[in-house]
Amino acid sequence: MGADAVQRRSIQTQEGTDAVQRRSIQTQEGTDAVQRRSIRPQDSVAHKKPNSEQKKIQLIQRALRSWYGKKGRSLPWRKTRDPYQIWVSEIMLQQTQVNTVILYYEEFLSRFPTVHDLAKAPLEKVLKVWEGLGYYARARNLHRGAKYLTAEWNGRMPDSETDLVRIPGIGRSTAGAILSLAFEKPSPILDGNVKRVLCRLFAIREDPKNRDVEKELWSLSKNMTPERGVHPYTQSIMDLGAMVCTPRSPDCLACPLNMYCLAYKNGLQHTIPMRASTKPIPHRQSALGIIHKQGRVLIIRRPEKGLLGGLWGFPGFLREGRKSFPDTLERGTKRDLGLVIQAGQKLGKVEHAYSHFKITLHVFECNSSSGKSKNRKNVNCKWVYPSQLKKYPLSGADQKVIKKFSVVGGQLSAKNKTQDHLQRNR
Ligand code: SF4
């Protein structure tokens, strides 16, 4: 280890010691708040003297490395050190399970093999490849990020946290992952998996979303990140969180860290991480129209900023007060698209859930009687044959509508037109 590395490490250790001292002071105060924070602060790795702390951290790193050698997952993005490919995988892995990401990752890279290819592509093409992966802001940010890198870095990925976090969609943890996995720089990460492992390992009994707690977790993550062998370390702690120290059923008996884990030692693995009580998710009701004109249907493109930005779909409007769904649909279409329609048969309902709300779509077949669809409120309109729908990037909810009501070949499936559905819901 070079002198710089030693110095850096001792700075980190000093930070750890400061944290220990801060926590010990709190412990001496003996307040309830302190008791909530940690079960037995003096037991924590972070509370030992620097040498002992350092030694224990090294043992944890060794245990993780050895476990990863035997049990680590072989994933497509682990075969590369290309920062662009690692960036794509890290963005896809935010909010999405590994098995789903595998299906998209290689397809995305085959369509956009380099930063320049991604920057040159129209957003609509990027969204089409992303279709079904959800959280479309990620795709829009990747696209914006590629344009930024092309303009500012000639398509190269910078290798410092300061520069990486300037790229749209890259936060500190993603920057840490890119630095450690592509550039072998000892840079901490703090994604959801790592947060959970650290909270349990050090028995942190507060909501990790709390700002002070998060600060402390960053400090712990930094202390845990080795100077050498950072690539396998980062992968191993991510894998441990995903495979063993899982949110609902941590497999402590099989865990390589169980002898160091304060949550396990105190039987708290099922109650840590603690969560502040969550608000109930709102449930919205919306009227959605499949509007016909001469064998074609109307689709609209949502504004690029906002929910489902840049995606196409059928026109839909949130129910206004106690108005009926057909009224909501007819008024909304006139107001926002300049089109007079008649809402006809109700085809049925489609349920969909987003991260922060649920929605029931009440789907109606409609006819356009007068007016010309106009692009208003930054919304583009198009009349397309149902067989052409697959060319457009569509939201998950719209795809459900297409599937449920067989909106293909210019016909809606008769099988879905039950008597119930034929009732107008005035
Ligand atoms: S012992 Fe259990 S709670 Fe602790 S890190 Fe391992 S799996 Fe997680």
Image (tube, rainbow, N blue to C red):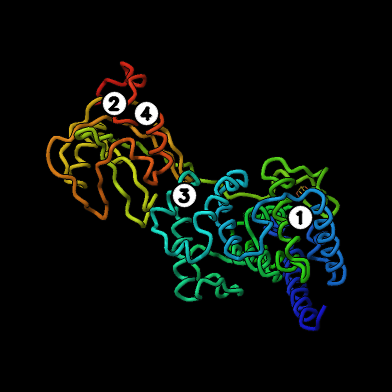
Snapshot quadrant of residue 401: top left
Do tag 4 and tag 2 residues touch (Cβ < 8 Å)? no
Which disc is residue 129 wearing? Answer: 3
- The amino acid type, in three-letter code, at marker 1 is Leu
Crowding around mark 3 (Cα neighbors within 10 Å: few <14, some 14 to 19, many 20+) is some
Spatial separation of the CA atoms under disc 4 and disc 2: 14 Å
Residue identified by numbered label 4 = 406
Which disc is residue 346 wearing? Answer: 2
For the C terminus, the quadrant is top left
Secondary structure beneath dot 1 equals helix
Residue located at (26% from left, 20% from top): 423
- The amino acid type, in three-letter code, at marker 2 is Lys
Residue 91: x %, y % from top left? 55, 57
Residue 358: x %, y % from top left? 43, 39
Does ligand 1 reach within 8 Å of label 1's beta carbon? yes
User: Which comes sooner in the sequence, label 2 or label 3?
Assistant: 3
Residue 163: x %, y % from top left? 55, 75
Query: Where 285 falls versus 128 (above or below)?
Result: above
Crowding around mark 4 (Cα neighbors within 10 Å: few <14, some 14 to 19, many 20+) is some
For the N terminus, the quadrant is bottom right
Residue identified by numbered label 1 = 201
Do tag 2 and tag 3 residues touch (Cβ < 8 Å)? no
Snapshot quadrant of residue 177: bottom right
Spatial separation of the CA atoms under disc 2 and disc 3: 32 Å
Residue located at (27% from left, 38% from top): 321
Query: Where 16 falls versus 248 (above or below)?
Result: below
Which disc is residue 269 wearing? Answer: none
Residue 289: x %, y % from top left? 27, 35
